[in-house]
Image (cartoon, rainbow, N blue to C red):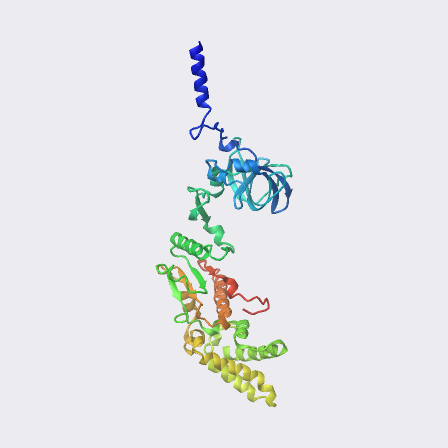
Amino acid sequence: MDEQSNLQNFVNEISSFSDDGGAPAKAQSPAGKLQPIGEVLEIAGSGSRIRMDGAVLASLQNHSDPSVSMSGQVGSQVKMAVGGSWLIANVRTMRSGDNGEILASIDFLGEGARDSAGGMSNFRRGVTRYPIPGDRVMPVSTQDLRSVFAADDSPHIEIGTVYPTDDIRGALYVDPMLSKHFAVLGSTGTGKSTSVSLILHRISELSPEGHIVMIDPHGEYSAAFKDCGELFNVDNLQLPYWLMNFEEHCEVMLTTHGSERQRDADILAKCLLAARTKGKNMEQFGKVTVDSPIPYLLADLNGILVNEMGKLDRAGDTLPYQRLKTKLEELRADPRYTFMFSGMLVSDSMGSFLSKLFRLPSHGRPISIVDVSGVPSEITSVVVSVLARMVFDYAIWSRTEPQRPILLVCEEAHRYVPKDENSGA
């Protein structure tokens, strides 16, 4: 009996030690039985403030689940049980509290159904029920992240893995993403351009007959899309000046401000309308306005300005006409503006230009890269305005035709979108 008792004691003593140094082994709870890491303090519409236990967070740092081991860190996720749902939130900021506590601000991401075993399914963005102060905050496991980020059979593209896991593919649903405006944001050097290139490559692979127009302000994307993109710059863009509407004409041709600018605009409107209606076969266009994209000769506009000046009695009244005439001659003579104000462009048609720009058909190159790095800075915003408006107008004009959605990508839009809300461009 004594030998049996001693043997059992020896076995029990051995079992109470771990393999790495003799310390008593800590039992790790299953992923569904993780302990709370804190509680809710305050609730707002889009987020909340929570209090977390620093000691509990420290004990999770060596957890075998990489998602659990990151619990409480900025950028990690936490969850709260609300009714029959799990509410998922992202940790945005952290600061020290009293007695080893950590106070954090979180942003709500969405919610999923909570099953009897504590798992989550059917995650969706948005929140229908909010927690209340005192509700427990739990760590998010890799299985939870798989429920949040895993893609179903809907058309999607994969762009990487979800950190900190190495097996959950990061997917984007194409139709919901492209059916609305979206932005890729980040600090300098974080890889925004690389991410955009990857997303566009994946979209092109999924839809090789798609139509994408990219505004490239630095000339950096041509190398990324040399196999599936068509490059347009000041050497081959050939953007017809007559595609500009009246406000865009004003942005390019008016040099004054205040009341003088309004007077110059009135004169330009009258002369531009006369130039647009001077062309041949006008009966096919119906009613013509200053905004109508009808080809006209720059020489005709110049001649109309000269004729209108000749009708004036006082020499001082000719100053607005002279300003417009001088600016027009400058645009025609400056080689930097040849891509847009060449007299040869009057013979181009809108259909041929849109077919070239929008890749209709794509011929295996669904992406148009419009490099505006060589465009004079004075008219960069106007060039972008014309291109963007053409995309929008095409969508309106072709509503009765087979649908050909066009994705417009604006790299560093803040560089050429004017800050002045009253600017025509």
What residue is drawn where x is 50% and y is 41%? Answer: 70
Q: Quadrant of the image for the C terminus?
A: bottom right
What residue is drawn where x is 43% and y is 66%? Answer: 371
Figure label count: 0
Residue 317 versus residue 162: which sits nearer the camera? 162
Question: Do we see residue 284 in this rendering?
Answer: no
Q: Name the residue at the top extreme.
A: 1
From the viewer's perspective, tell me whether residue 231 is left or right of residue 95. Answer: left
Residue 101 versus residue 280: which sits nearer the camera? 101
Q: Is residue 348 above or below residue 226?
A: below
x and y percentages locating residue 231 in the rendered image: 39, 65
x and y percentages locating residue 379 in the rendered image: 50, 72
Q: Is residue 343 above or below residue 420?
A: below
Q: Is residue 313 above or below residue 11?
A: below
x and y percentages locating residue 389 in the rendered image: 50, 65
What residue is drawn where x is 46% and y is 80%? Answer: 332
Q: Is residue 57 above or below residue 206?
A: above
x and y percentages locating residue 406 in the rendered image: 45, 59
Residue 71 versus residue 144: which sits nearer the camera? 71
Question: Do we see residue 276 in this rendering?
Answer: yes
Please identify the quarter of the rendering in which residue 1 is found.
top left
